[in-house]
């Protein structure tokens, strides 16, 4: 491969360059790299694999799935691929429609901006491919919505816009799945629906290439379905580690130490899906969103109310917070979470908070984690409130994960109902064990040990002596009045 530090005037053997440019990796690494210093120059062995996979010239499959871990220039490879297609179809003077589709309109617009930049500003591209104009006026269309040179058309699209098939024969779907549209079951279903609608449109025309690209976020969402369940794609999937789980697949950029740092920063859930391409499955999750979709709108009339305090530190970011939960248990044993919060409080602030919560919510049973109580507020609490009725919960040598995982069966059977606005609790439930803090969960789990199901209250049977006597007297009086009326009518 030639040195990257050259000028277009040094291109003497244009036939050789043209021949080499049939290689997509060469096209990106050498030709496009001259159009801007920020892209393509870091391409290495991993990008070579991606280029060879997506390129029709080296892999003639017409339906492909590319899933490579985060931060590997997948979209940059696609940018090079789109420019490659525009150039070579312009050379062949063949009519073709190319569409790049992504999740958001902003990302689609940004991709189009990059395409337009390289078509105008890459001098080496114009030397090797004189068929590509170097001014906007030379294009049949050069707008933010459509680039056309000869009979070659390229346009961007997004899932936020109406899906159309038109005459496009090369369809590139890039990162349709993102962190926003997989947050809810509704978002996941909507994405599936839009993707399937797009595929139904494509069935009406003869497609040259369908290329879906992305990384999985959730085991229920589109990318994981394509990776594991769809059998119609030619697939290339590359996680951050080789099969041994130790050796990095792109060591030039991501060393083992850097990947471990990323794991620590991102958390196990995100790292597992976005870097290892192994979304945490349902059986590995503490709680699924559908288990807590139904929120309580009215608290039970007959209940037993418990409050649990799991004391923590007072320096946010340096210490674990205090987790406090208040739960109502109804006659059926269902929990209604009345209060759930994490707080960083000084010992005196925590004492005053506990007292106020007891006054406001009037729990039947208030407990505090014994070991933490002894090292946080015991010295100040007992002298101030010697008569305040608070007992203890104990971990009984159970580690925190063991305590928290006991909640799963309760959540799965939908016997724990959250209230509106309990976002910290919801986040911890849905992201555990990757959540930053899990002290609300620990507090909630202790309710399993102290729950009390209130005795069912029925209308008690009462003797009807007084009521029966009153009815008899009323009936006798009525009959007497009728008889008197009848006798009076005779006269």
Image (spheres, grey):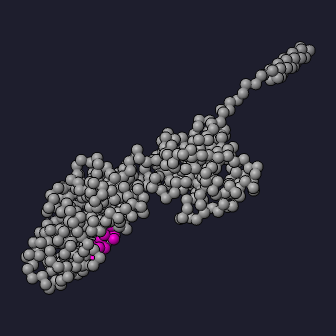
* Furthest-right residue in this view: 491
Residue 73 sits in quarter: bottom left
Asked whether 112 falls inside the magenta stretch, the response is: yes
Quadrant into which the C terminus falls: top right
In percent of width and height, residue 427 lies at 50, 55
Report if residue 135 is visible in the image: yes
Quadrant into which the N terminus falls: bottom left
In this rendering, is residue 385 above or below 332? below
Q: Which residue is drawn at 54% across and 64% down?
A: 318
Q: Residue at x 31, y 73 (%)?
A: 113
In this rendering, is residue 332 above or below 11? above
Is residue 410 rendered to the left or right of residue 378?
left
Q: Which residue is drawn at 67% across and 44% down?
A: 365
Q: Nearer the viewer, residue 150 or 349?
A: 349
In percent of width and height, residue 238 lies at 27, 58
Q: Which residue is drawn at 59% across and 60% down?
A: 313
Q: Which of 6 and 204 is in front in this view?
A: 6
Magenta-highlighted stretch: main secondary structure? Answer: helix
Q: Which of 255 and 56 is in front in this view?
A: 255
Is residue 177 rendered to the left or right of residue 39?
right
Report if residue 116 is visible in the image: no
In percent of width and height, residue 242 lies at 26, 57
In percent of width and height, residue 96 lies at 18, 64
Residue stretch in magenta: 108-117
């Amino acid at each position: 491969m030639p040195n990257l530090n050259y000028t277009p005037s040094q291109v003497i053997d244009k036939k050789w360059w043209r021949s080499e440019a049939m290689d997509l990796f060469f096209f990106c690494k050498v030709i496009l790299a001259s159009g801007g210093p920020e892209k393509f120059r870091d391409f290495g062995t991993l990008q070579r694999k991606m280029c060879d996979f997506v390129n029709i010239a080296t892999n003639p499959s017409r339906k492909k799935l590319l899933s490579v871990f985060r931060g590997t220039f997948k979209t940059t490879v696609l940018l090079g691929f789109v420019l490659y297609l525009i150039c070579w179809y312009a050379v062949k003077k063949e009519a073709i429609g190319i569409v790049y589709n992504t999740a958001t309109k902003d990302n689609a617009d940004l991709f189009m901006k990059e395409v337009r930049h390289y078509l105008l500003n890459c001098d080496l591209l114009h030397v090797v491919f004189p068929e590509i104009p170097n001014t906007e006026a030379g294009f049949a269309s050069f707008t933010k919505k459509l680039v056309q040179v000869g009979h070659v058309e390229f346009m961007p699209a997004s899932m936020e816009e109406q899906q159309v098939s038109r005459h496009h024969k090369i369809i590139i779907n890039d990162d349709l799945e993102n962190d926003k549209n997989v947050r809810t079951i509704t978002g996941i279903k909507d994405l599936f629906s839009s993707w399937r609608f797009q595929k139904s449109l494509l069935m009406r025309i003869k497609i040259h290439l369908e290329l879906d690209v992305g990384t999985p976020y959730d085991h229920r969402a589109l990318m994981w379905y394509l990776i594991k369940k769809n059998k119609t794609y030619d697939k290339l999937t590359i996680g951050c580690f080789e099969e041994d789980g130790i050796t990095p697949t792109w060591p030039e950029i991501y060393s083992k130490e850097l990947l471990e740092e990323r794991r620590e920063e991102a958390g196990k859930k995100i790292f597992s899906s976005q870097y290892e391409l192994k979304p945490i499955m349902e059986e590995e999750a503490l709680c699924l969103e559908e288990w807590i979709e139904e929120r309580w709108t009215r608290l039970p009339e007959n209940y037993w109310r418990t409050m649990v305090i799991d004391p923590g530190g007072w320096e946010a970011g340096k210490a674990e917070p205090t987790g406090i939960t208040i739960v109502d248990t109804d006659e059926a044993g269902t929990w209604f979470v009345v209060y759930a919060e994490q707080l960083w409080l000084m010992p005196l602030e925590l004492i005053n908070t506990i007292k106020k919560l007891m006054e406001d919510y009037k729990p039947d049973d208030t407990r505090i984690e014994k070991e933490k109580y002894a090292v946080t507020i015991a010295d100040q609490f007992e002298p101030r409130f010697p008569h305040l009725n608070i007992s203890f919960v104990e971990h009984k040598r159970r580690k925190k994960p063991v305590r928290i995982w006991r909640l799963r069966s309760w959540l799965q059977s939908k016997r724990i109902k959250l209230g509106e606005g309990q976002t910290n609790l919801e986040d911890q439930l849905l992201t555990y064990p990757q959540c930053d803090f899990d002290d609300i969960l620990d507090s909630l789990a202790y309710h399993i040990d102290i729950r009390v199901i209130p005795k069912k209250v029925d209308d008690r049977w009462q003797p009807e002596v007084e009521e029966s006597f009153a009815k008899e007297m009323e009936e006798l009086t009525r009959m007497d009045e009728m008889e008197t009326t009848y006798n009076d009518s005779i006269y």
